[in-house]
C-alpha cells in the first residue's frame, strides 16, 4: 500500500485493523510460550488485550517510535470514537486506540519486522 493510500484511510479504520493484528500477536505468543487449555489462554489474552494493558503498552513503546509512527499514534489517540468501553478510563481508551492505529498502519504498510520488534518489547514487560 502506498503512503498516499495509507493517509487516505480513516484513523479509526487503521485502529480496527490494528486491533486484530495485536490480538493475533498476543494469541500466537500465548500458544507458543504458555500453551494450556483454551479457556486459560483466553483469560491470559484478555489480560493483555484490554484498554488498560494496551495503554500501558503504548507508553512503553513511545520512546522507540519514529516521527512517522508517533504521528500515527497521536492521530489514533486523538480520534473521537463513537463509544467507549465501560470498563476503562477515557485516557486509557484513547491510548489503546493510538496503539491499535499504529499496529494497523505498520501492518498495512508491510512493516512486519517493526511490528514484531515493538510487540516483543511490549511482551517482555508483561511477565508472560
Image (cartoon, rainbow, N blue to C red):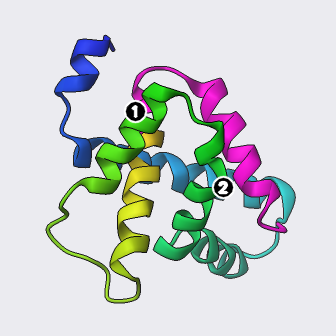
Camera-nearest residue between 86 and 98 = 98
Report the residue at 32% width, 88% height from top: 86
Report the residue at 37% width, 70% height from top: 93
Camera-nearest residue between 44 and 106 = 106
In the image: residue 95, left or right of residue 43: left
Residue 123 located within the stretch drawn in magenta: yes
Report the residue at 75% width, 47% height from top: 121
Q: Position of residue 66 (x, y in %)?
A: 55, 28
Q: Quadrant of the N terminus?
A: top left
First to last magenta residue range:
104-128
Mark nearer the N terminus (2 vs 1): 2
Q: Residue 124 lies in what quarter of the image? A: bottom right
**Mark 2 Cα within 10 Å, few/some/many (few <14, many 20+)?**
some
**3D distance between C-alphas at marks 2 and 1:** 18 Å
Q: Residue 40 lies in what quarter of the image? A: bottom right
SS for callout 2:
helix
Q: Residue furthest bottom?
A: 86
Q: Position of residue 13 (x, y in %)?
A: 24, 44
State the residue position of label 1. Answer: 105
Residue 22 located within the stretch drawn in magenta: no
Camera-nearest residue between 57 and 67 = 67
In the image: residue 32, left or right of residue 12: right
Q: Which mark is residue 31?
A: none
- Residue 107 visible in the displayed image: no
Q: Quadrant of the C terminus?
A: bottom right
State the residue position of label 2. Answer: 60
Above or below 31: residue 92: below
In the image: residue 109, left or right of residue 37: left
**Mark 1 Cα within 10 Å, few/some/many (few <14, many 20+)?**
many
| Secondary structure that dominates the magenta span | helix
Q: Position of residue 82 (x, y in %)?
A: 14, 68
Amino acid at each position: 500500500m502506498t503512503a498516499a493510500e495509507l493517509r487516505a484511510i480513516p484513523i479509526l479504520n487503521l485502529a480496527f485493523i490494528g486491533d486484530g493484528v495485536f490480538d493475533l500477536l498476543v494469541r500466537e505468543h500465548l500458544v507458543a510460550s504458555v500453551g494450556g487449555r483454551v479457556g486459560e489462554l483466553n483469560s491470559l489474552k484478555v489480560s493483555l488485550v484490554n484498554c488498560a494493558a494496551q495503554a500501558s503498552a503504548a507508553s512503553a513503546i513511545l520512546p522507540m517510535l519514529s516521527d512517522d509512527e508517533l504521528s500515527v499514534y497521536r492521530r489514533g489517540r486523538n480520534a473521537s470514537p463513537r463509544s467507549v468501553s465501560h470498563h476503562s478510563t477515557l485516557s486509557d481508551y484513547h491510548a489503546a486506540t493510538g496503539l491499535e492505529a499504529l499496529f494497523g498502519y505498520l501492518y498495512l504498510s508491510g512493516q512486519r519486522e517493526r511490528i514484531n520488534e515493538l510487540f516483543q518489547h511490549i511482551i517482555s514487560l508483561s511477565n508472560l
